[in-house]
Image (tube, rainbow, N blue to C red):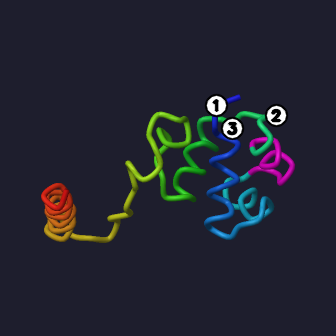
Amino acid sequence: MIEGLPGKLKELRSKYGLTQKQIAERVGVSPSIVSGYETGERTPSTEVLLALSHLFHTSTDYLLGRKAPGQEILVDLDGLTEKQKAAVILLVQAMKESAQSDT
């Protein structure tokens, strides 16, 4: 069992308004396996852990307990040009600097 994973999965499932069956369909396992992840009776494979992180737009580090919630958010930049990707990165950096100066 991965410490804290069951609670995180339940919280994320609730946040995204998904059922165990919907999660199971999206990550390629049965609903009973998803239930096992949420009770701590089962541990997801690397492939399923990665699929869960993509589904919930979070990092595997967060699911594994290595990052606090909100410290890392994955943003899908597929389809953007390199110039657009750079603009997104600059925007995030400017927002971080602004937040630091506000404190």
Q: Where is mark 2, residue-wise?
A: 41
Nearer the observer, 42 or 6: 6
Residue at 42% over, 53% down: 70
Is label 1 in contact with label 3 (beta carbons under 8 Å)? no
- The CA span between labels 2 and 3 is 10 Å
Task: Give, as a single range, the part of the protein colored magenta.
Answer: 29-37
Amino acid type, residue under disc 1 in the picture: Glu
Amino acid type, residue under disc 3 in the picture: Pro
Report if residue 63 lies within the magenta region: no
Residue at 27% over, 70% down: 80
The quadrant the N terminus occupies is top right
For residue 3, the mark is 1
Q: Where is mark 3, residue-wise?
A: 44
Dominant secondary structure of the residues highlighted in magenta in the image: helix
- The CA span between labels 1 and 3 is 13 Å
The quadrant the C terminus occupies is bottom left
Q: Quadrant of residue 96?
A: bottom left
Q: Quadrant of residue 76?
A: bottom left
Q: Earlier in the sequence, mark 1 or mark 3?
A: 1
For residue 85, the mark is none
Report if residue 32 lies within the magenta region: yes
Residue at 87% over, 49% down: 32
Task: Determine crowd level at label 3: few under 14, some 14-19, many 20+ residues with C-alpha closer than 10 A.
Answer: some
Residue at 17% over, 55% down: 100
Q: Residue 45 in the image: x percent, y percent?
A: 66, 35
Amino acid type, residue under disc 2 in the picture: Glu
- The CA span between labels 2 and 1 is 12 Å
